[in-house]
Amino acid sequence: MNTFTEENYLKAIYHLSLQSSSVSTNQIAASLNTKAASVTDMLKKLAEKGLINYTKYQGVTLTAAGEKIAVSIIRKHRLWEYFLVEKLNFKWDEVHDVAEELEHISSKELVDRLDDFMGHPKYDPHGDPIPDSNGLFKTHELKPVATLVINENGIISGVRDHSTAFLQYLERMQLTIGKKIKVTEINDYDHSVILQVEDKKVHISREVANNLLIAI
Amino acid sequence: MNTFTEENYLKAIYHLSLQSSSVSTNQIAASLNTKAASVTDMLKKLAEKGLINYTKYQGVTLTAAGEKIAVSIIRKHRLWEYFLVEKLNFKWDEVHDVAEELEHISSKELVDRLDDFMGHPKYDPHGDPIPDSNGLFKTHELKPVATLVINENGIISGVRDHSTAFLQYLERMQLTIGKKIKVTEINDYDHSVILQVEDKKVHISREVANNLLIAI
DNA sequence: TAAAAAATTTAGATTAGTCTAAATATTTTA
DNA sequence: TAAAATATTTAGACTAATCTAAATTTTTTA
């Protein structure tokens, strides 16, 4: 078994790997709010355990074993988030911190039964895919609302920014997962966008349009 | 916030306090599978934090603050056990270890919503009372089956031994919480007891009769 | 392409929790 | 009630994870 800290490092490396193939010490330090020196120490330990490929000064990648652990933690995180929202009536902006704790509960039996209990959901409350008990999942293809042209429509299916502030903003604007939207106007000057959402018009900034994702 | 370890010490002290008013270093060491020297170190720390009353060589008691924490952990433990059995179909002998992990999830909001979700159960799968969100609970009065005389009956409402082995044995014998039993015979020689349970007779040893509890 | 800047690693400490072995206090018992 | 037995604490050490400051390597840039 691995410690919570090791699991958090693996998860951070996994997420960072989705952006750039190799992950740097400083990137990890920033994402975990810790210092580069601490990261170096942990990287040695994880390399020792065969969970990452690490060469001094050259950044890291996960090994198959490391990736498997990372994915299992992400599975737990997203399943718990789904549970919190669907069964316990938490809001989508309230679940992250609790799921950060729950994801470290070790019992695989527990997660698999929880998955059964909820009917094997495919996506979490933020639209992120939930790996199955074998670690398999399909990333559905998404693109920012900002890439749409006038009169194009789509279904809100994910967010690029998972911050509480952004989620609360979307909630307030009724821009939530599953909603059908249509671009009715794009402002040439500031690239802000006006959307038709159900029977309302919603005006969003370019920044919001970049962080709000629709299914392709 | 307190560490998992501190929480485990407080919980252990709480449980031991139910037997004897003051709890000794060795009792704690035994119950946590650790060494007396380690316990002494932790007792100093907990006393420092105002969670226990500790005088060298004199044993410890919980302060009101310490007891409050202990009870909140027990609440979480028992609610999770109930959830695991009632919602996820775990057996009553399978839930302890998972609940030992889940009880340290800190969110009070989570526990209270879980409690709502399950309809505020009063007892966990082993018949132990679940404290409410204010830490209040009533210990229902219980006595061992061994105290019954011939023709007395009662309802199985708890166990004194929570070990997997004992729980599995009871399960196999269909001696589970809520079952109505009647003593039909007591063996003078070994004090073993024959019970009428529904339409079956079950023969149990004195030891089992001592660890199986019925409501008074 | 050599100096400057940035990134990374190493060295040496610190804190939490644990341990063993030795010292001390309390309790038992003869 | 004094010796023996038992319980508890102290001293000193270890591991995991972290930090700061200094040293080293890599990258950038002029």
Image (cartoon, coloured by chain):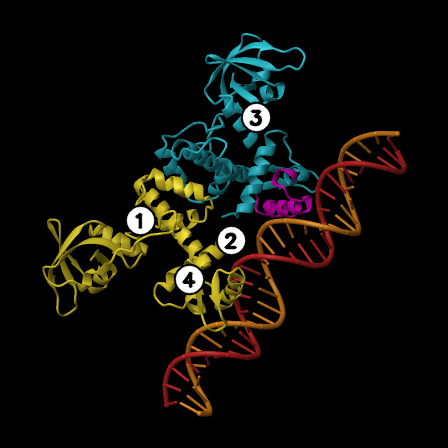
Chain colours: A cyan, B yellow, C red, D orange
Front of the two marks 1 and 3: 1
What label does residue B3 carry, if any?
Answer: 2
Do the residues at pointers 2 and 4 share their chain? yes
Magenta span includes A37: yes
Q: As drawn, is B88 to the left or to the right of A82?
A: left
Q: Identify the residue at horizontal 51%, vertical 21% (top origin).
A: A173
What label does residue A110 carry, if any?
Answer: none
What label does residue B124 carry, if any?
Answer: 1
Mark-to-mark CA distance, 2 and 4: 16 Å
Residue ID for mark 3: A160
Mark-to-mark CA distance, 1 and 2: 25 Å
Magenta stretch?
A30-50
Is mark 2 in CB contact (under 8 Å) with mark 4? Answer: no
Residue type marked 4: Ile
Q: Secondary structure at mark 1?
A: loop
Mark-to-mark CA distance, 4 and 1: 21 Å
Is mark 3 in CB contact (under 8 Å) with mark 4? Answer: no
Q: Looking at the image, which is closer to me, A171 or A212?
A: A171
Q: Chain of mark 2?
A: B
Residue A187, x across and y down, in percent: 63, 11
How crowded pointer 1 is (Cα within 10 Å; few <14, some 14-19, many 20+) is rated as: many
Residue ID for mark 4: B13
Q: Chain of mark 1?
A: B
Quadrant of res B23: bottom left
Residue type marked 1: Asp
Q: Secondary structure at mark 3?
A: loop
Q: Chain of mark 4?
A: B
Is mark 1 in CB contact (under 8 Å) with mark 3? Answer: no
